[in-house]
Amino acid sequence: MSHDPLQALITERLATLDPVVLEIHDESHLHVGHAGAQGGARHFRVRIVSKRFEGIGTLACHRLVYDCVRDLMPHPIHALAITAGTTQTEGHP
C-alpha cells in the first residue's frame, strides 16, 4: 500500500473493479510548470487488468476507471493516463 494518501485513495477506488493487476504511478514530476499542475493537481498513469473489462471496448473500460475517480478530477487529479486490459489479453487466469 502506498504511503501517499491520494495514491492510496485511487487504489481503494479502483479496487471496486476487482483488478488482477493494478499499477499506479505518480508522474507529476514530469509536468512541473504545466498549467494543470498549478495548485498541486497531480498526474497519474494507471495500468489495470480486470475480468470486468472482458467483452467491452477500450473506451468503456476507461469510462469505468474514470467513474471511480470522477469526483477527484480536475483536482487533486489533473490527468489520468490509463492502460486497461482484460485477464485474457494480459495472460492472467
Image (tube, rainbow, N blue to C red):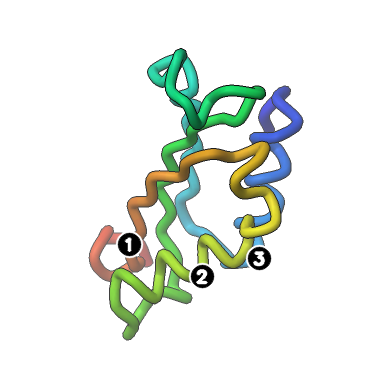
Q: Position of residue 12 (x, y in %)?
A: 71, 50
Q: Position of residue 64 (x, y in %)?
A: 51, 70
**Mark 3, secondary structure of its residue:** helix
Labelled pair 2, 1 in contact (Cβ < 8 Å) = no
Q: Residues within 10 Å of mark 1 (few under 14, many from 20)?
A: many
Q: CA distance from mark 1 to mark 3?
A: 16 Å
Question: Which residue was labeled with disc 1?
Answer: 85
Q: Amino acid at mark 1?
A: Gly
Q: Which mark is drawn over residue 16?
A: 3
**Mark 2, secondary structure of its residue:** helix
Could you tell me which residue is drawn at 51 percent across and 62 percent down?
A: 65
Q: Position of residue 82 (x, y in %)?
A: 38, 50
Q: CA distance from mark 2 to mark 1?
A: 12 Å
Q: Up-down: is 47 above or below 68?
A: above
92 vs 62, nearest the viewer: 62
Q: Amino acid at mark 3?
A: Thr
Q: Up-down: is 32 above or below 55?
A: above
Question: Which residue was labeled with disc 2?
Answer: 64
Q: Amino acid at mark 2?
A: Leu
